[in-house]
Image: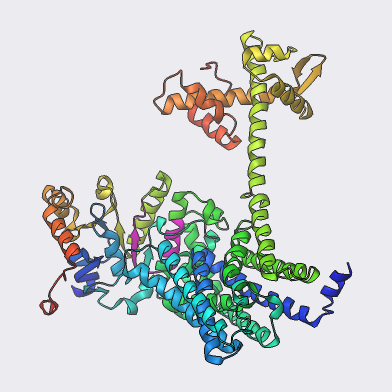
């Protein structure tokens, strides 16, 4: 607990820099990264991150020290060059984009490692700290870097506020943006430049290998929660900042734990968590939907079987005979335990009453039972009227459809077929 | 006579991968009519529309709209791309997409104003999507998505409309509502240029036709274009010689014309 209080009160001034740095880097990359994600250029972010390495090394060689301005210029230049190279390969050769990304990523990264080794062999380079660029070292963030990161975030926010409409239309429908005369090239240049800048800013903390996570993941995770773009941007920033500060805390509380990888791990928890629990699109809500459907089908099949039993005895006007499970199984091959579960659930819904071993429909149960049978037979009639289908095939189609016909569709069916009660024919 | 022309395409040649997709296309189109561009798959219909809209660079020739360059009359032209050309899972509502029809270079940095909102609402109303106004575009049917694109073009308040296959994959209700809309636009004096591939319906939809297969096969009113000879020229494999030449040009990366001949 003390460590946590020390952390949030910035007892160690270094913590302040790390937290501030994470805040700035992660906001920048989440905002602009969401647009890269929407433009389906997320993987290019990964290539750019790797491709920054030779630029960083050259920046170091020019300045002779770890000067943030030189490093940023070098990183920006080689990041841009990589993006340009990918587009050039795609446009001027038969190589497709996925291959082009792989080629550019590995060749720039390879060159970067060569330069890195070269620098480290020199006396001046031995304590350069450049090797942290591979996996990042958030603890080494200093004041001048914080200022640089802040400038980058301000640039991104200004561009987003000013050009929001343009960013959206270029991401959604570039040809249309062109057709109304918008400066598409300029907007694409702007988005790419800001993406490269955001990646360059994150290299110090995350390293070239993990940085692409901050570009791709926040937007992808946020997309699962909502359809509203503004909300996606806000959520992406929240996920990313939380992961950033969380990673910084884990690293602070356990000395020796690296910040960058922890940031990415926490971010991945958000991502996989979203895949699991996001509303509508999440796996759990889809699984629950499937389970709900299965239950509904079972309930309705039981109610239908009760009707059919009565019908076979010509008692379907009253529907008031007490039935044993064996009676129902004689009409339809239920699994006994499914049937008992279903009957219990129907009792809770007040459709069925139990009397010892027997079951009887309540008034609302009778109504529901008639509704299902009617839908089934209406659908059979509809298929026979409108399509060419043999009478012995029409039943199985209606078996499923009876469960999903809404009251509105029921009315339309009724109107189209001119049938009011329950059709006699059962196929 | 000249001011009756909506689109003039002059000696237009467009190539992809070294082979011509459109070859020496040359025609003038009338105003105030519903014009169909027809031709088999891969005959360059979409490329023609894109070159009129300035989206592809021609290797020779030019396009004039209302006797001017596109940039001078951009606000009078609305473009409806193919529905499949965008990702409909994009996080936007019907209203958001139709509002894009109001975007201009000069108002890009401004907030949308009341008049724009009014026009967008009217356009959505015209295609019958008012009750879906705030619906996510991913939750619409194919026909509804197509109507969103048409509403966006309506919101542009243009005089010339270029539509790429608006009838593909739409339900009967959408088809008839688009047709009604086209008649209304025609009555307002608008010109509509539509790419269409279903020969069955051509005579119900259009006043004027352009029949295309890499080269211009025919153009004019329905009786002039829909002759047996024209159709078999465009569709009947009569042009195998032409496509053999195109393949040869591609393979040898040969220039399509000698530079100075074009003058």
Residue at (59% x, 82% y) in the render? A155
Left or right of A181: which side holds A249?
A: right
Foreground pick, A365 / A49: A49
Which image quarter: residue A178?
bottom left
Q: Is residue A43 magenta?
A: no
Q: Which residues are magenta?
A: B147-167
* Count of number-bearing discs: 0
Q: Which residue is at a point 26% across and 66% down the rendered structure image?
A: B31
Residue A227 seen anywhere in this rendered image of the structure: yes
Q: Residue at x 34, y 60 (%)?
A: B163
- Please tell me whether residue B139 is drawn above or below residue A423 in the rendered image: below
**Quarter of image, res A342:** top right
Is B162 placed left or right of B147 in the picture? left
Left/right placement of residue B190 relative to residue A304 reads: left
Give above or below for A88 relative to A99.
Answer: below
Q: Position of residue A264 (x, y in %)?
A: 65, 64
Which residue sits at x=16%, y=69%?
B254
Q: Position of residue B56 (x, y in %)?
A: 31, 70
Within the image, what quadrant is residue A132 found in?
bottom right
Inspect this view and state whether residue B109 appears: no
């Amino acid at each position: 607990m003390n460590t946590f209080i020390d952390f949030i009160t910035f007892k160690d001034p270094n913590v302040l820099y790390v937290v501030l740095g994470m805040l700035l880097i992660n906001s920048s990359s989440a905002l602009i990264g969401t647009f890269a994600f929407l433009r389906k250029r997320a993987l290019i972010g990964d290539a750019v991150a790797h491709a920054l390495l030779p630029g960083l090394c050259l920046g170091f060689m020019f300045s002779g020290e770890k000067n943030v301005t030189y490093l940023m210029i070098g990183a920006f230049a080689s990041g841009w060059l990589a993006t340009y190279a990918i587009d050039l390969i795609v446009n001027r050769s038969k190589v497709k984009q996925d291959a082009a990304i792989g080629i550019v990523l590995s060749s720039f990264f390879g060159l970067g490692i060569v330069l890195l080794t070269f620098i480290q062999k020199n006396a001046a380079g031995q304590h350069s700290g450049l090797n942290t660029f591979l996996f990042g070292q958030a603890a080494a963030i200093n004041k001048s870097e914080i200022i640089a990161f802040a400038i980058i975030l301000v640039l991104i926010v200004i561009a987003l506020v000013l050009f929001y409409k343009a960013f959206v239309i270029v991401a959604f429908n570039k040809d249309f943006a062109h057709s109304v005369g918008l400066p598409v090239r300029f907007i694409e240049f702007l988005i790419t430049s800001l993406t490269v800048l955001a990646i360059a800013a994150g290299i110090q903390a995350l390293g070239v290998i993990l940085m692409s996570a901050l570009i791709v993941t926040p937007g992808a995770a946020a997309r699962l929660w909502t359809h509203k773009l503004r909300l996606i941007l806000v959520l992406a920033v929240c996920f990313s900042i939380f992961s950033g500060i969380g990673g910084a805390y884990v690293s602070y509380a356990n000395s020796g734990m690296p910040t960058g990888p922890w940031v990415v791990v926490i971010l991945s928890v958000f991502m996989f968590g979203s895949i699991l629990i996001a509303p509508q699109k999440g796996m759990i809500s889809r699984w629950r939907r499937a389970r709900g459907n299965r239950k509904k089908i079972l309930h309705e099949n039981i109610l239908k079987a009760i009707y059919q039993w009565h019908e076979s005895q010509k008692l379907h006007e009253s529907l008031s005979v007490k039935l044993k499970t064996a009676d129902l199984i004689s009409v339809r091959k239920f699994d006994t335990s499914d049937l008992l579960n279903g009957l219990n659930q129907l009792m809770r819904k007040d459709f069925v009453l139990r009397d010892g071993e027997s079951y009887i429909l309540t008034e609302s149960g009778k109504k529901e039972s008639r509704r299902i049978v009617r839908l089934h037979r209406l659908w059979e009639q509809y298929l026979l009227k409108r399509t060419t289908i043999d009478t012995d095939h029409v039943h199985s189609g209606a078996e499923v459809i009876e469960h999903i016909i809404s009251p509105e569709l029921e009315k339309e069916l009724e109107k189209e077929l001119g049938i009011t009660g329950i059709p006699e024919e059962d196929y | 006579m000249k001011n009756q022309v909506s689109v003039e395409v002059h000696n237009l040649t467009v190539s992809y991968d070294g082979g011509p997709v459109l070859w020496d296309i040359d025609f003038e189109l009338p105003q105030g009519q519903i014009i169909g561009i027809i031709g088999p798959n891969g005959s360059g219909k979409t490329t023609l529309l894109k070159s009129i809209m300035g989206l592809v660079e021609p290797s020779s020739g030019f396009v004039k709209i209302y006797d001017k360059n596109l940039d001078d009359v951009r606000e009078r032209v609305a473009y409806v791309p193919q529905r499949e050309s965008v990702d409909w899972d994009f996080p936007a509502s019907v209203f958001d997409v139709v509002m894009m029809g109001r975007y201009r270079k000069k108002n890009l940095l401004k907030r949308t104003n009341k008049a724009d909102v009014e026009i967008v609402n009217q356009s959505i109303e015209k295609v019958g999507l008012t009750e879906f106004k705030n619906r996510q575009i991913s939750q619409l049917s194919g026909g509804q998505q197509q109507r969103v694109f048409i509403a966006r073009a309506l919101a542009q308040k243009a005089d010339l409309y270029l539509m790429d296959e608006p009838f593909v994959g739409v339900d009967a209700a959408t088809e008839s509502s688009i047709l009604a809309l086209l008649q209304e636009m025609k009555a307002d004096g608008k010109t509509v240029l539509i790419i269409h591939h279903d020969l069955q319906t051509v005579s119900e939809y259009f006043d004027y036709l352009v029949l295309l297969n890499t080269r211009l096969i025919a153009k004019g009113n329905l009786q002039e274009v829909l002759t047996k000879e024209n159709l078999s020229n465009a569709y009947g494999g009569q042009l195998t010689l032409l496509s053999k030449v195109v393949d040869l040009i591609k393979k040898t990366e040969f220039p399509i014309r000698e530079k100075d001949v074009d003058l």
